Amino acid sequence: MFRSLLVANRGEIARRIIRTARRMGLRTIAVATEADRSWPHWREADEAVFIGSGPASESYLSLERIVAAARDNGADALHPGYGFLSENAGFAEACADAGLIFVGPPPAAMRAMGSKAEAKRLMVQAGVPVVPGYHGERQEAGFLRQKAYEIGYPLLVKAVAGGGGRGMRRVDRAVDFDAALESARREAQNAFGDDRVLLERYVGNPRHIEIQVFADGAGRTIHLGERDCSVQRRHQKVIEEAPAPGISAALRMAMGQAAVRAAEAVGYCGAGTVEFVLEPPKANGDPAFFFLEMNTRLQVEHPVTEMVTGFDIVEWQIRVAAGEALPVGQEDVRFEGHAVEVRLYAEDPRHDFRPSTGRIWAAAFPEGPGIRVDSGVAEGSVVSPFYDSMLAKVIAHGADRAEALARLRGALVETTIAGPKTNIAFLSAVTGHPDFAAGSVDTGFLDRILPVLALPEPGLGSAAPVVAGRIAAEAAQAAERVRGPWARTDAFELTGLGRRQTLAVEIEGRPAEAIIAWHHGGPAVVELDGTRIEPAPPAKVVWGDKCAFVLAEGEQLAVGFSDALDRAVGLAVDGGIVHAPMHGKVLHVAVAEGDIVAQGAPLFALEAMKMEHTLVAPIAGRVAKVRITPGEQVEEGAVAILIEPAAEAEPAAGEAAGA
């Protein structure tokens, strides 16, 4: 066994690997960036190396910096986790060249499974079922059009390289094939630098089932059962569970054996996952399954397999990389109970799952029987725009699926994140949906239920007690300073019959005027923009900088209290304040000071968490101030652009709306 291990990753997976490595007595070395100084993973290692300022391309994706960090700090081995460089054959070879043990599969296996066409060719040779289609080298448009005719419609055009749904198009009619082919090729070239495609028969409403496999250097390959990963959004997994609901013992055995053959076909070693699509079942028989791809790394969802088998997959990875044999054979693998995992993201489900950034003012995760939380964050962590927005994974295990789901839903209720928006309420709603509870899901499940999925409304009533408390506190402070009723301007009555106090606030970033009134000794009454607000039942309140986060049922309502200068700016431009919705990099600015813009006109584009977001004008008017420049990093909530309302803006001759 080697003595020291560098973990070339961040967040929850880095903490998870470090936990096992330290238990095994290994010296651990973490890597981190300046943007991750507030994250806990690097503090939990024996040593830490800072490898860049923030952008992944200059840090976690830099092969040279990672290898140098390992070599210069005396590491014997390197664990890549998942994502970043974990499936990069060149990285594995660079580790070997530097004298480092790479905790992962051989580079040749990575390359074989990294090409969809090559992987499917090998699977056919190994007797693993693949979706009927064309996986060859010829790429002429006319030839592919003929192959599409032979396969039949509907079909999929898929990029040979890459994944995540990029370079993939569904084609339902022959007349649409040429346009779909051109579009898929263009996207594949831009995303992966490779415009080659393959064609496959479209499998409608499939389930996504994956098999955890493991192989050692002595030639033993086993599987650890299946996981159902059908609940997906934009081809990204959201919920995973083991075992898959409704899978027969015969089908489980057939898929497991096929996965083992797939791993053996490429000379695999270490942990990997073979993914299949499962067709809707035909009458009187098991559904057909087809090879989709193989992930040559640890999977995000590996904890559910650990929960039902009792094995530590990361420990096995380390021992096999050190030359040890697998500790068990296939006959020793037993499955107990059921496990479900959900991915907790910093995102806003109410606004198309837009990534959310900023400081985490409170973080609390559940504990209890059958509950496991793999978290990457803690109170004080700052969610930056540079990396994936996953904060934690919440996993629940039970004697059966019903108990596991009940524990999971209870755990989500007990989970607290204040600051960035999260998908906690969304996850609670999905796991409580009747179809999910019945196990009746496929890869189109979320698309079907999203338009009608009921999320709890935060409600302005939740803000009322916070606003009242803040105003009362400010009034008390003012009274203490003045020490007498004569200088007051809040309608104080000598008879004690009542008084009023006003305050400029922001509710979810929207400016509002709050008024609180006390009358005849009765309860305080709160008005927001002239509307009386009935206080809601007490909710948890977390205070941040100039802001209170009201938390209830997994939802968050941000109530901001501006300083005097901010209030003056807000009153001057009314609803024309455009904030940066998240921490990110300004890609370009489409307007200049003095321009006249129409409501909805694009103002600037922001890049955050690998996505581009275009901000538009909330009102029509004149651009009074532009406070951002291309290339600048802006903080969430920063005032980016100020627009004078149309009534106050007098267009100059020749100026056009939207200019």
Image (tube, helix red, strand yellow):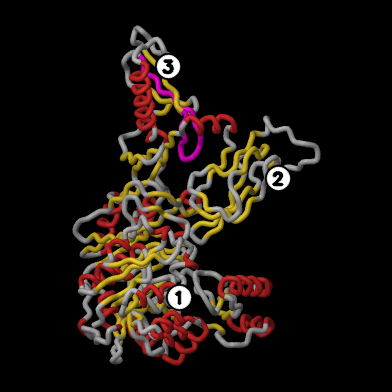
Q: State which quarter of the image contains the N terminus.
A: bottom left
Residue type at the position of mark 2 = Gly
Q: Position of residue 326 (x, y in %)?
A: 24, 84
Q: Position of residue 249 (x, y in %)?
A: 29, 78
Between marks 3 and 1 in the image, the one whose residue lies nearer the viewer: 1
Residue type at the position of mark 3 = Asp
Does residue 445 show up? no
Identify the residue under disc 2: 658
Residue type at the position of mark 1 = Glu
Identify the residue under disc 1: 64
Which residues lie in the magenta part?
Answer: 504-519
Mark 1 falls on what kind of element? helix
As measured in the structure, the alpha-carbon distance from the residue carrying label 3 to the one carrying label 1 is 65 Å
Residue 631 appears in which quarter of the rendering? Answer: bottom right
Q: Magenta stretch: dominant SS?
A: strand
Please report whichever mark, 3 or 1, sits nearer to the chain's N-terminal start.
Answer: 1
Residue 33 appears in which quarter of the rendering? Answer: bottom left
Whether residue 574 is situated above or below residue 419 in the rendered picture: above
Q: Position of residue 50 (x, y in %)?
A: 39, 65
Identify the residue under disc 3: 490
Between marks 2 and 3 in the image, the one whose residue lies nearer the viewer: 3
Q: Position of residue 453 (x, y in %)?
A: 43, 51
